[in-house]
Image (spheres, rainbow, N blue to C red):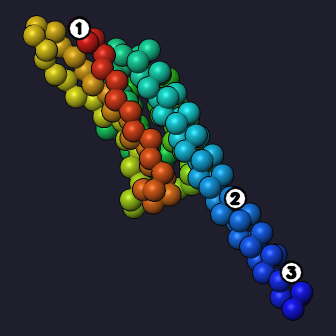
């Protein structure tokens, strides 16, 4: 009887450790996605004149990233972010989105650009999503 109680205790502790580990790993993955996403937003914001080099690039395929001629700094940043995503979350799966988008809006007489960064991993389960408005009144 005492062996059964002891075995139940071991199974319970093992289950608790397993759930705790999964939760910790997911939290770590989200924190890393957040760090990469914030790096992207800050870099794009500081390099607004080259915004077109960053948008609509697929950060799931590192070897397929290309920029205009003479834009090696921008290409290197995109590749670095792509490699970081690959290191943190692995290869992008079918449901993962790793994109930078920009959309222009006119508010009154001022042109405003809204930049959206969407990064997902774990087959779409872990998500970082941010929007920033540039040149806002």
Q: Quick one: SS at disc 1? A: loop
Q: CA distance from mark 3 to mark 1?
A: 67 Å
Is the residue marked by circle 1 packed among few (<14), some (14-19), or many (20+) residues within 10 Å?
few
Q: Toward the viewer: 39 or 66?
A: 39
Is the residue marked by circle 2 packed among few (<14), some (14-19), or many (20+) residues within 10 Å?
few
At a point 30% along the width and 20% down the height, the residue shown is 133
Q: CA distance from mark 2 to mark 3?
A: 23 Å
Q: CA distance from mark 2 to mark 1?
A: 46 Å
Residue 137 marker? 1
Where 12 sits versus 99, above or below? below
The numbered mark, 3 or 1, whose residue comes first in the sequence reads 3
Residue sitting at the far right: 2
Residue 83 makes an appearance in the image: no
* Contact, mark 2 vs mark 3 (Cβ under 8 Å): no
Name the mark nearer the viewer: 3 or 1.
3
Q: Position of residue 42 (x, y in %)?
A: 47, 21
Q: Toward the viewer: 116 or 86?
A: 116
Q: Quick one: SS at disc 2? A: helix
At a point 41% along the width and 18% down the height, the residue shown is 45
Q: Toward the viewer: 83 or 16?
A: 16
Q: Quick one: SS at disc 3? A: helix
Residue ID for mark 2: 21
Residue sitting at the far front: 1
Residue ID for mark 3: 6
Horizontal side of 132 relative to 25 (left or right) equals left
Q: Quadrant of the C terminus?
A: top left
Is the residue marked by circle 3 packed among few (<14), some (14-19), or many (20+) residues within 10 Å?
few
The numbered mark, 2 or 1, whose residue comes first in the sequence reads 2
Name the mark nearer the viewer: 2 or 3.
3
Q: Position of residue 17 (x, y in %)?
A: 74, 63
Q: Position of residue 132 (x, y in %)?
A: 34, 24
């Amino acid at each position: 009887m005492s062996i059964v109680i002891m075995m139940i205790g071991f199974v319970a502790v093992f289950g608790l450790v397993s759930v705790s580990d999964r939760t910790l790993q997911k939290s770590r993955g989200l924190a890393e996605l957040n760090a990469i996403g914030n790096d992207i937003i800050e870099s794009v914001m500081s390099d607004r004149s080259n915004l077109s080099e960053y948008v609509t690039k697929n950060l799931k395929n590192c070897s397929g990233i290309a920029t205009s001629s003479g834009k090696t700094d921008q290409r290197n940043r995109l590749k670095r972010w792509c490699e970081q995503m690959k290191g943190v979350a692995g290869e992008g799966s079918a449901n993962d989105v790793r994109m930078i988008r920009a959309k222009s809006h006119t508010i009154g007489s001022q042109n405003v650009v809204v930049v959206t960064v969407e990064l997902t991993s774990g087959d779409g389960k872990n998500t970082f999503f941010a929007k920033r408005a540039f040149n806002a009144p």
